[in-house]
Image (spheres, rainbow, N blue to C red):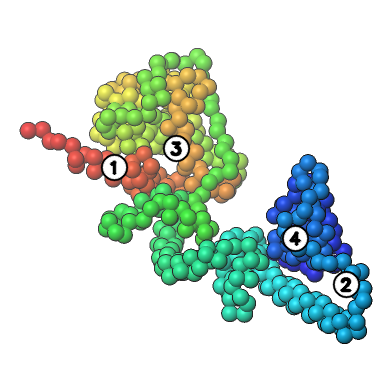
Amino acid sequence: MARKSYSEEFRRQAVDLYESTPGATVRGIAEDLGIVRGTLRHWLEVYGTGKKTAADGTLTANPLQSKKPPARSSTLAGESPEQKIARLEAENAVLRAETTKLTTEREILQRAAKYFGRGDALVSRFQFVADNSATFEVKRLCELVEIERSSYYAWVKAAPAREARAAADAELVERIRAVHTEDKTCGAPRITADLNDGAEAGERVNHKRVARVMREHGIRGYQKKRRVRTTIPEPSGQKYPDLLKRDFTAEAANQRYVGDITYLPLADGSNLYLATVIDCYSRRLAGWAVADHMRTSLVEDALKAAAATRGSLKGAVFHSDHGSVYCSKDYAKLCGQLGVTQSMGAVGSSADNALAESFNATIKREVLQDAACWPDELTCRRQVFRWLVRYNNRRRHSWCGYLSPSTYEARRAATLPTAA
């Protein structure tokens, strides 16, 4: 909104542009020149010829100039000294009034520049008028920043409601920060669930409002910029049919599981490996194992841990990819002993085991965040363990209606009918 003092030549060129452009409008030419329409209209009154070019190229009378001033030559003809002095004084008064008007406009727009340095948002225009209404006429201020006075007065009337919302948002952002400080990976949906947990009906907050407040204050959950994934297939191993067909749901706990292995990179260039067993019903991590190798014993330990958690896995389905350890005879033997039926997706298709893949991506995103690796093995084991435990017991999961997997299972179990 910065404004400069326009030379007479510029004004005449602006008027000529309007009059010579076929079908031109004051609004269109004013926008092209970066001036307000009222200023261009004033220039047309002072410098215009009274003609303009129509859309078909013909000259027509300018509807903005209903009266054309008499020619200067006729005004001067037979003019007495007294008349000449009176005319000059009148012209001088007009010029002084125009100078005063332009000086006022320049001062107003110079003040407005700081409001619109980062864009001319409507609220900035309203605020500018409010801040300068004691110095300048509201009508003139609204004209210069091109807003309707009725809109401005409606904005002023709504000020108490805005202040109340601002105070409520200030209180809300402190509650959000408290939740986010505890777990910086949480985004708006999980923070909303946490704020509404146990809240009265009138105290609950909408997730869109939480997202807006977080966005305004730069609070955000972690989003990983890139993902690395590795797969080691075993073409010669045992094959099993796909019993899930990408349906990662279950009617009850301890019926369907998915699992995978993911690597945990360390600073010295080596890796630890995490094997998982995830219940499709609640997304609960029923079993896991961490080791510095990818031998069959790694996935066996994870499955044994799940059996210990559930008491028994008899009749359950375990779905995996075609990794060599899952295709091994030793793993098949363990599944037979535990009463587990194996299931496998197509070779090379991560979507057939998407639930386990998603879990792997989530743990790396939320624990490593922007770091490329863990500094050492001990730190890795500690941080991964803390996250896995928190995942089951505290971390709110969208699948569970933003309850933790353990809480989800407990509440669902409490609502099931009991046998007579």
Q: Could you tell me which secondary element the residue under label 2 belongs to? A: helix
Answer few, some or many: residues within 10 Å of disc 3's Cα (few below 14, many 20 plus, some between 14 and 19).
some
Of badges 3 and 2, the one in the foreground is 2
Tell me the CA gap for discs 4 and 2: 19 Å
Name the kind of residue labelled 2 in the image. Answer: Thr
Answer few, some or many: residues within 10 Å of disc 4's Cα (few below 14, many 20 plus, some between 14 and 19).
some
What residue sits right under mark 4 in the picture?
Answer: 65
Quadrant of the image containing the N terminus: bottom right
Name the kind of residue labelled 3 in the image. Answer: Phe
Q: In terms of sequence position, does the residue under pointer 4 or pointer 2 come before the other?
A: 4
Q: Could you tell me which secondary element the residue under label 1 belongs to? A: helix
Residue 58 in the figure: left or right of residue 215: right
Name the kind of residue labelled 4 in the image. Answer: Gln
Q: In terms of sequence position, does the residue under pointer 2 or pointer 1 come before the other?
A: 2
Residue at the location (51% across, 16% down)? 235
User: Measured from the top left, where is residue 324 in percent x and y?
Assistant: 48, 22
Residue 276 seen = yes
What residue sits right under mark 3 in the picture?
Answer: 359
Q: Nearer the viewer, residue 99 or 233?
A: 99
Residue at the location (45% across, 24% down)? 352
Q: In terms of sequence position, does the residue under pointer 1 or pointer 4 come before the other?
A: 4
What residue sits right under mark 2 in the picture?
Answer: 75
What residue sits right under mark 1 in the picture?
Answer: 408
Residue at the location (46% across, 50% down)? 187
Q: Nearer the viewer, residue 415 or 16?
A: 16
Tell me the CA gap for discs 1 and 3: 18 Å
Residue at the location (67% across, 64% down)? 117
Residue 80 in the figure: left or right of residue 29: right
